[in-house]
Image (cartoon, rainbow, N blue to C red):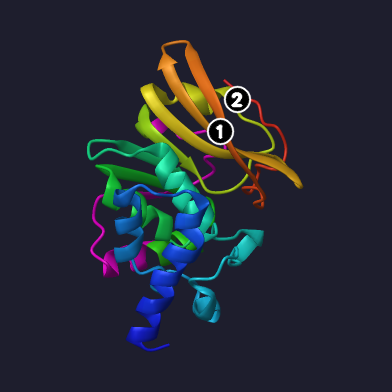
Amino acid sequence: MNEMNTEQARFNMIEQQIRPADVLDPVVLDTIAIVPREEFVPAAYRQLAFSDTNIPLPSGQVMMNPIQEGRLLQALNIGKEDNILEIGTGTGYLTALLAKLGKQVISVEIDENLSKTAREKLSQHNVDNVILEVGDATIGWQKHAPYDVIAITGALASMNDNLKQQLRVGGRLFAIVGTDPAMSALLITRVAEQQWSEENLFETVLPPLINGEKPLEFVF
């Protein structure tokens, strides 16, 4: 795909997939327009970089499709001073988008090889406000908590209270919760020290995070 065709495909992705899904925030759309999605997808699937599909990754994981990514970013309403936790680095593409929108991203990936590849890609594109760590953040990542934003890139069978506790007051969490075929994208906002609101944004399907396929309890 030459440069002109690539830019046309990117334009079509935004105008024919993302915008019709009611992702209308100009900051989100502009950010998607400038981060080269095609350079973050695995080489074997590069021709699908702008397709309305979940691109396969190792260990049964996938990249969110463009509509899911756009809706996630719009729902989280990320500000320039926001500290963000991303659970599931994947290829680093969504990490780069989050980093463009916020102050700092802590991104945790359970697959060490995926994290290494994402580090290389982010470095190539001069994304330097990201801390990449390897581990299982299915029930949160206490090390850098609390967070203004938590973005979860694979599905969870159920929402764990420990994740909600790691939000600052005013913080927002996006998660796709449930089991196939009944999954809901949720936006959870911490409105007070011991009070959260929950909004059901849309129905969708996404493979579970590794260790996210069954309800987990926080162990003290």
Q: Residue at x 60, y 25 (%)?
A: 218
For label 2, the crowd category at 10 Å Cα-Cα, with few meaning under 14, some 14 to 19 and many 20 or more, is few
Image location of residue 219, percent across then percent down: 61, 24
| Residues at marks 1 and 2 touching, judged by CB atoms closer than 8 Å | yes
Of residues 142 and 153, the one nearer the viewer is: 153
Residue 103 part of the magenta-drawn span: no
Is label 2 in a helix, a strand or a loop?
A: loop
Q: Which mark is residue 179?
A: none
Residue 120 part of the magenta-drawn span: yes
Left or right: 139 as drawn, with respect to 149: right
Magenta-colored span: 119-143
Q: Number of marks in the image? A: 2
Q: Is residue 76 above or below residue 38?
A: above
Image location of residue 179, percent across then percent down: 74, 42
Image location of residue 61, percent across then percent down: 61, 58
Left or right: 208 as drawn, with respect to 38: right
For label 1, the crowd category at 10 Å Cα-Cα, with few meaning under 14, some 14 to 19 and many 20 or more, is many
Q: Residue at x 37, y 89 (%)?
A: 2
Q: Residue at x 58, y 48 (%)?
A: 154
Residue on which the image places disc 2: 218
The quarter of the image holding the N terminus is bottom left
Residue on which the image places disc 1: 139
